[in-house]
Image (tube, coloured by chain):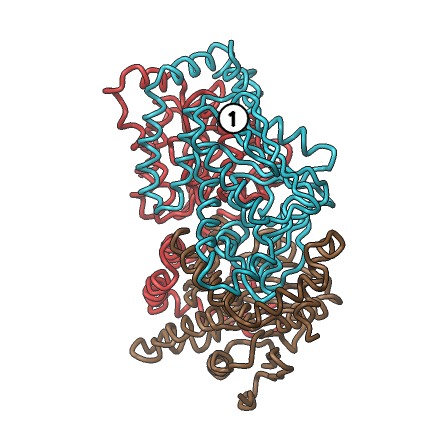
Chain colours: A red, B cyan, C brown
Amino acid sequence: MAYDTYKLLRVVREGALVTAVVDAPPINVITMELFQELAALSIELEADPDALVFVLKSADPDFFLAHFDVALLIAMANAPAGPVGDVNTYHEMCARYQRMDKVTIAQIEGRVGGGGAELSMSFDMRFGVIGKTVINQMEVPIGILPGGSGTQRLPRLVGRARAIEIILGAEDLDAETAEKWGWLNRALPADAIDAHVTALARRIASFPPGAVRAAKRSIETSALPLDEGCRIEAELFQSVLFTDTARSQMQRFLDLGGHTREGELRVAELSAEVARPG
Amino acid sequence: MAYDTYKLLRVVREGALVTAVVDAPPINVITMELFQELAALSIELEADPDALVFVLKSADPDFFLAHFDVALLIAMANAPAGPVGDVNTYHEMCARYQRMDKVTIAQIEGRVGGGGAELSMSFDMRFGVIGKTVINQMEVPIGILPGGSGTQRLPRLVGRARAIEIILGAEDLDAETAEKWGWLNRALPADAIDAHVTALARRIASFPPGAVRAAKRSIETSALPLDEGCRIEAELFQSVLFTDTARSQMQRFLDLGGHTREGELRVAELSAEVARPG
Amino acid sequence: MAYDTYKLLRVVREGALVTAVVDAPPINVITMELFQELAALSIELEADPDALVFVLKSADPDFFLAHFDVALLIAMANAPAGPVGDVNTYHEMCARYQRMDKVTIAQIEGRVGGGGAELSMSFDMRFGVIGKTVINQMEVPIGILPGGSGTQRLPRLVGRARAIEIILGAEDLDAETAEKWGWLNRALPADAIDAHVTALARRIASFPPGAVRAAKRSIETSALPLDEGCRIEAELFQSVLFTDTARSQMQRFLDLGGHTREGELRVAELSAEVARPG
């Protein structure tokens, strides 16, 4: 996995952590070229056995991803027999970022709209900047609808009522409100977001890969009925429990202070020490 | 659609926007008469091809809708063979407000309880007043349960744990908490709610009707499994994309400043200008 | 139901309210012994026709339930043919606390982690202490995953994105954030939580048992498709409506001031008076 075929994405790998910076001036509109790079990257990432965490950010502090190219949509609208299938390739790209066995994080420092917001909603986590990040679904006023999974993922993220407000009202959603509504995992100060996301990404990248992958897969099954999900969870649990990694990590947890009052009062640190190579 | 057969509802139409004011003194209890008017209105609205947005409010600043008529419930309880079917007509009315191809908004300035809260939860959006709006499900203490869809819609709105707290605890839920929990889209100052809801309603009413209807329908399918919902979304997307409205609106979006940094920094305004007749 | 076979749980019954205090020093690790007592208690509670509300708390102000015994997990990992089935008995215990026809409340004043957090998520409601309650899923860093229903219940409680942050990030979640995200029903001051939970528990315990049980059961069906859930709700509604309890409680509601402006402005109190023996 060389990650060296991209022109609008600057991709860097550091151990199990892959970071991509979108740099498509003037405002990161998702043109066909950028779409193809984002889709290609999702395929390369998915196939990379060593990648465990992926962070997407933007070179432009004002725009994360503006939206899908409207000129391209007009061309599609004028040629119905043409690139219609692309709608589904957009769905496929989004599903890949959601379901790949890596943790995907969107670090959204500026505006994100339309198809850019839809792509972001497919990521496992979203972090934004207080007073800066703005979300906007501008499709309905211009006569279309969020057709890149937005009408499906937004209600799952913020509930039906607020999804209707965002999609049909098409007003700006600020970072604080987006955090309250669950669109953002957290809204952070502008000078803190990069350190915060990097620390979280590195932390996860330091954990046993098998456990990270199995846990994500198990969470993914939570869309199933509860008892069915629990059955799959039990299988995945056993698939990680009966491994040398689990045995040695759990032993290390006890050795480093697990089960003691002192150790358990700082369990978040302790468990990170367990994961750190001894 | 004349909207002129109502005695407890004052219905006004202004273009694509229909507003109804409940005026059933002393406290807007949902008597059989008021229930029948609310149900009849849902049918008239559903059949109105020109209506796009509906707002329900109350003439009484203290009560939006108190609850279903308890004297009537006692009569039902005493005559099991009697008007039992009415339970399901209540469900049907609620489903109609949820699923009609119009956007339905409840502007809840005072108290709302029991069946009134259930009806409100069927609307697409709910707005309330800080320090004034109060929600209460009083069914369980008086020996029954929220049988007008409350046990179904409340967990969807605020999660299972808080639905249990509201329904089984039967305490008052204030506006600020209701907003935090997602029962209200937003809690607004008393002197701001009318302007806020009216502006939102007019804004949506100014958008292309086909896009508004298709977007709502697509959001409605988000209760299906994700991939299934995405398939329907793709169909609905194409149903609006290949229209003259979409073509001209999207072109107008580009003409008015879409894809430029200046235009996209004020995209919420820009998209409203697109929708405004040129 | 004597509730007198427990050594690590101090169980007290007061009318329809049962309270259990976990007292398993030093830090309430869920050892096999504690697990068996918690499971046995769920069975005894489920079978108790007089219990209506159950509260679980801890004798240790710093720890509600630390997590499942890691030494025991190591033993399981070393003997795959051994007590593997226990994973599913954990699922069964959790499901029993969720589905029993009693309201289950976790009063979480200190830290709760791993399997303790999973058990807590199975309860109907969770209350915590501002500045004190801390939630941590430490499984992934030590090589396993939350296999006691955590990957299933956490996304239902806080959404997929925050479930991924909690489980894969394995950082501490403080009480205020847990309340915002919906993990806790409410985060309360340290000196207020006991009175708050006790008052809520007693209040529910004073309501008509048939209505409490039917309402919980109806809420439970809200995981079904909406129309299906509404059908069951209608049946459960009729099962409580056509009872002498409902008839007399509803009449009392009218007698005590229901349907009047004064009465309805204090409906939360009024409905509690209805439930109080006359």
Foreground of the two, A261 or A217 = A217
In the figure, B248 relative to B32: above or below?
above
Compared across the picture, whether A222 is left or right of C167 comes to left
Foreground of the two, A176 or A79 = A79
In the figure, B161 relative to A88: above or below?
below
Compared across the picture, whether C44 is left or right of B58 comes to left
Residue at position x 37%, y 58% from top? A225
Determine whether the residue tagged by mark 1 lies in a helix, strand or loop: loop
Q: Residues within 10 Å of mark 1 (few under 14, many from 20)?
A: few
Foreground of the two, B272 or C138 = B272
Figure quadrant of the N terminus of chain A:
top left
State the image coordinates of residue B245 (x, y, percent, origin top left): 40, 16
Q: Looking at the image, which residue sits at the far left?
A: A81
State the image coordinates of residue C101 (x, y, percent, origin top left): 49, 72
Compared across the picture, whether B214 is left or right of A26 comes to left
Quadrant assignment, res A212: bottom left
Query: What residue did someone put label 1 on?
Result: B2
* Number of numbered discs: 1
Residue A185 visible in image? no
Q: Amino acid at mark 1?
A: Ala
In the figure, B234 relative to A213: above or below?
above
State the image coordinates of residue C192 (x, y, percent, origin top left): 74, 66
In the figure, A202 relative to C70: above or below?
above
Which chain's residue wears label 1?
A: B
State the image coordinates of residue C108 (x, y, percent, origin top left): 62, 68
Residue at position x 62%, y 64% from top? C250
Residue A245 visible in image? yes
